[in-house]
Amino acid sequence: MSTVITEQATDTVTEGAIRIEDVVKIYDPDGAAVMAVDHCSIDIPAGEICMIVGPSGCGKTTLLNAIAGFHDITSGSIHLDGELLCGPGQPEAVPGSDRIVVFQNGALFPWKTNLDNIAFGPMMAGKLSKQEIYDKARSMMADAGLSGTENNYPGEVSSGLRRRVEIVRALMNDPKVLLFDEPYRALDSLTKSVMHEALLEIYYRNKVTIFFITHDLEEAIFLGHRLIIMSSRPCKPKKIVEVDIPHPRDYSVLTSQRFREIMNEAKDVVHEEAQKAFDAGEKEG
Amino acid sequence: MDKSMDPTTSASSSEVSSAALTMFRLSSWLKSPRPYLMLIGFAAVLAFWFFSVEVWKLPRFVDMPGPTEVFTEWFSKEPYYGLSVYTPEYYKHIGISLRRIAFAFFLATALGVPLGLFLGWSKTFREFIFPLFELLRPIPVLAWVPLAIIMFAGSETPVIFLTFLASFFATTLNTMLGVESIDESYSRAARCLGANRWQTFKHVVVPGAMPYIFTGLQISIGVAWFSLVAGEMVSGQYGLGYLINTSYMMIEYPKIIIGMITLGIVGYTTSAMVRILGDYLMQWRVRELALGDN
């Protein structure tokens, strides 16, 4: 079954394969070493929506930050399309527009209008003319149903709309990978379900690899090709669940028989890890 | 307050111009009880002044000029003590104080903002400069008076230096705090999107620190007036601080009160100008706060 999904994902996408090999991350803030990631290996084929599921504070974000280049890893390696991001001799990846993070609390610049936010990446790169960049930005906003909010500041629009602007801002740079750090955590469940459909719609139009961190199992199954359920700290894959519900998906999937079966399969493992994290009293992060 | 300003339905609020927004805020301010409470506050103080000096003649208030005397003098075409809104001397005092404030405030901003930005941005730079800065900052402006007079020639530069000093510390410190207050996600996002260090500084650090910078400038203009009056009392000719001090020595008490009220009005006006400039430069924040107001 897994090969079917992998093929489906890689059918149209040739770039954005992530290989995480034996990654260890040890924090040493005050003399006492804390292992955040423990010999973690994950292989993500190009174009897959890979959901990293685990209790809050298990070290998932550490892994995401290592891919993005926000901090180093202690050992192991991470490759993107066969090229070394970080590993021996290069402990910290260089952040770049081939891997763009969509942040937990959103990181649209509040001092720039939605349109200026979306144009930011290409404007920094300076490869295209301003006219070309803004034309592209406007048309991408129109495609994502964001027309009419170009001149609004992020603080003026709903949080759901802000998330969409942030995803479009990332896609403007033609990234290979989008890294989502629990972006919908703060949204209410009704807005969330709308956001999920909107995200899939964007994904179907711009196939990229998606590395998506969440602790919401329903979200994970609805969006993902595959769930990697992580153990609580130190973080390492504990169980992999294939979601063999065909894409494109819509909201009706949530009530299907198969959805409930997968939910049941994953639930016990997730619950067990959440219990462990709870008992250990780890701080959410 | 107004349902049409609700964030979820504000997709069309880009058409709301800043002028219209100002008018909207002004009209809702006039409809609220706030301006009337403010007037009552003013009236209460005036009434207390009037009754304590002119009606009850309280013991310690004997030498105090009453409101009638002060306002008659202030708006008289032939003022008894030679100072009113009709005498050029009055405007000379205001003008000279304003010029000193302008010099000092401009200098403090031009030096303090960049210094604060670099202090917040570069750790090495901060470790180098900040301890020295923190040692100098608590020294009150008055303690600098002798040194200012020794160091600077003439009577004008020491006053400007003293005025500058307090402003400079307030601006620098707030700008630095502004840089430190910026959520790390913003600079991470900028790096993800391909911005280099300089671009991040320009597009994230400077605008991100802007709200704190303007808070700093508000404080800065306030302490500038404070230090100016201190400076003018010991050095210099003309200026509102000088006016108050010499009026005291010449026993021309109504002029003291005229000088004080004028200081209040002029000080408030400059501070409002800084706020308006801040609002103008930070439309994003004005709009955000307008939406969050209800």
Image (cartoon, grey):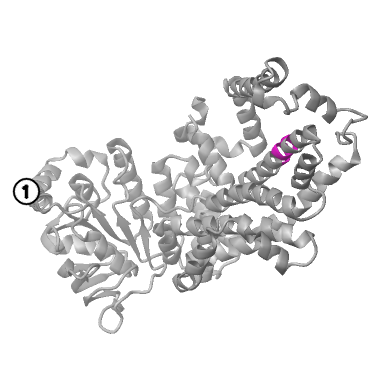
Q: Is residue B232 above or below residue A29?
A: above
User: Where is mark 1, residue-wise?
Assistant: A268
**x, y (%) of residue A172?**
46, 60
Magenta span of residues: B261-266
* Image quarter of the C terminus of chain A: bottom left
Q: Nearest the camera: A196 or A213?
A: A213
* Image quarter of the N terminus of chain A: bottom left
- For the residue marked with disc 1, what is the amino acid? Asp
Q: Residue at x 26, y 79 (%)?
A: A87
Q: Magenta stretch: residue B199 in it? A: no
Furthest toward the top, the residue is B55
Figure disc tally: 1
Quadrant hosting residue A241: bottom left
**Left or right of A116: which side holds B194?**
left
**x, y (%) of residue B198?**
53, 70
Chain that bears disc 1:
A
